[in-house]
């Protein structure tokens, strides 16, 4: 329990963190990896190069300071991050290392403004926050291991099938090498895949949503190949496309994630953009089994890159409304009339096709611009934020700037 004095000291740094937060986290990661390069086997190198992880951590530190007197307010964020940590194999012994360099980074960036009182307050606060993470993650490790077919750390899987779903998306059907049962999961969750790419000093770990329903003897991940091979965020996905085939082995951690289809009888609206279809397809197929009223809206560039269209059309779903939006449909798309709207998803179009029931739950996933646009559109239509559920492919960032 933090003392009133410590809480007041932490809160006094909120404005400073808002201004210098990213500078602090950039300095933090630089020192962390210089002194502990082995942690590069855990952290996403692409997110580091693009500054995404630094910004996400800065947002988290700012939120912790702002809510230091009511940490329960950030518990949803803690659980979201803890799911990712569990899938990456983060251990309790990593937390003191992180704390050490976070405090050093605060001191380096703020210089004389980082008084001994402020540093002591943050050391105390970090210790409490770290313990919350450790306890939550320990419970998650135990839950992952004790469920039927579960395991705690890593497990070797074999590619049983590899199927092209569109010009850019390929599915990998993974079965465990040991032939034993695999853990179930909640529709919308992901697995982490660890790969060692020849020529790279450190391993890479990426999260891929499970695109089929639970209860199968395999896990299916559906991976987009990035056209711009210079982009660091495509290195693992492109490696899977180009170098991993049937009978090849992959190291996998148990399903994780806090973005999943909630148990309910309420109607659902699923909105996906591009490869963001993967977690929502699993939700869609689960909703069919539940005979749940569902509206599925998918946005893609055109039919050539639209994955799983035939799988959705052939789905036996008694209460499904399915809509397709192509940004730039091809002549073949126009001839086949296989889409409902050209351009982008808008508030006006959603108002035309949705009933906007107050109980309806909205799930959406896709590229960041898509996510921001959907958040704005739903907000403009009066959808309550508590009825919106979304997933980021990468570190969580704020969608609110699009609201201005």
Image: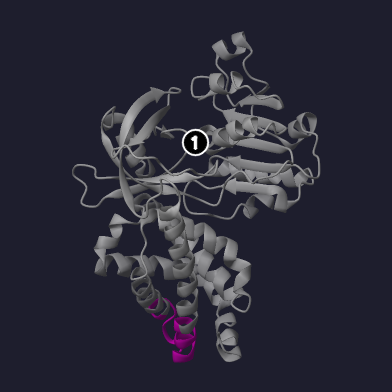
Query: Residue 331, located in which quarter of the rendered image?
Result: top right
Q: Position of residue 270 (x, y in %)?
A: 64, 36
Left or right, residue 374 beside residue 199: right
Q: Which residue is mark 1?
A: 215
Identify the residue at horizontal 55%, vertical 39% (top origin): 366
Q: Which stretch is magenta?
A: 107-123
Q: Is residue 121 magenta?
A: yes
Q: Position of residue 265 (x, y in %)?
A: 73, 41
- Main structural element of the magenta stretch: helix, strand or loop? helix
The quarter of the rendered structure image containing the N terminus is: bottom right
Q: Position of residue 403 (x, y in %)?
A: 69, 51
Identify the residue at horizontal 32%, vertical 50% (top origin): 154
Q: Secondary structure at mark 1?
A: loop
Vertical side of 115 occupied by 403: above or below: above
Left or right, residue 72 beside residue 348: left
Q: Position of residue 343 (x, y in %)?
A: 64, 27
Identify the residue at horizontal 46%, vertical 59% (top origin): 140
Q: Is residue 87 magenta?
A: no
Q: Is residue 10 visible?
A: yes
Q: Nearer the viewer, residue 53 or 243?
A: 243
Vertical side of 177 occupied by 69: above or below: below
Q: Is residue 113 visible?
A: no
């Amino acid at each position: 329990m933090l003392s009133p004095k410590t809480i007041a000291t932490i809160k006094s740094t909120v404005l400073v963190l808002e201004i210098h937060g990213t500078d602090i986290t950039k300095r933090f990661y630089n020192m962390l990896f210089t002194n502990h390069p082995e942690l590069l086997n855990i952290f996403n190198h692409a997110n580091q190069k693009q500054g995404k992880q630094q910004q996400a951590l800065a947002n988290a530190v700012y939120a912790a300071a702002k809510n230091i007197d009511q940490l329960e307010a950030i518990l949803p964020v803690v659980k979201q991050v803890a799911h990712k940590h569990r899938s990456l194999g983060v251990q309790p012994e990593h937390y003191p290392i992180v704390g050490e360099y976070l405090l050093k980074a605060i001191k380096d960036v703020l210089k004389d403004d980082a008084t001994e009182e402020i540093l002591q307050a943050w050391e105390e606060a970090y210790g409490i926050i770290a313990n919350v993470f450790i306890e939550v993650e320990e419970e998650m490790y135990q839950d992952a291991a004790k469920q039927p077919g579960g395991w705690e750390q890593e497990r070797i899987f074999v590619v049983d099938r590899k199927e092209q779903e569109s010009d850019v998306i390929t599915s990998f059907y993974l079965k465990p090498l040991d032939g034993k049962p695999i853990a179930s999961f909640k529709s919308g969750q992901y697995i982490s895949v660890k790969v060692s790419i020849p020529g790279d000093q450190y391993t890479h770990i990426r999260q891929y949503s499970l695109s089929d329903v639970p209860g199968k003897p395999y896990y299916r991940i559906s991976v987009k190949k990035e056209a711009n091979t210079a982009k660091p965020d495509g290195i693992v996905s492109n490696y899977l496309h180009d170098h991993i085939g049937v009978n090849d082995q992959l190291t996998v951690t148990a399903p994780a994630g806090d973005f999943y289809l909630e148990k309910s009888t309420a109607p659902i609206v699923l909105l996906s953009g591009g490869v963001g279809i993967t977690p929502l397809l699993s939700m869609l197929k689960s909703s069919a089994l539940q005979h749940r009223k569902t509206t599925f809206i998918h946005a893609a560039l055109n039919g050539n890159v639209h994955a799983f269209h035939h799988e959705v059309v052939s789905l036996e779903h008694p209460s499904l409304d399915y809509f397709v939006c192509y940004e730039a449909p091809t002549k073949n798309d126009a001839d086949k009339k296989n889409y409902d709207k050209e351009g982008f998803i808008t508030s006006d179009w959603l108002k035309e096709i949705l009933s906007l029931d107050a109980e309806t739950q909205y799930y959406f996933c896709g590229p960041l611009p898509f996510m921001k646009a959907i958040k704005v559109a739903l907000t403009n239509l009066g959808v309550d934020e508590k009825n919106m559920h979304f997933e980021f492919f990468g570190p969580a960032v704020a969608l609110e700037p699009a609201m201005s």
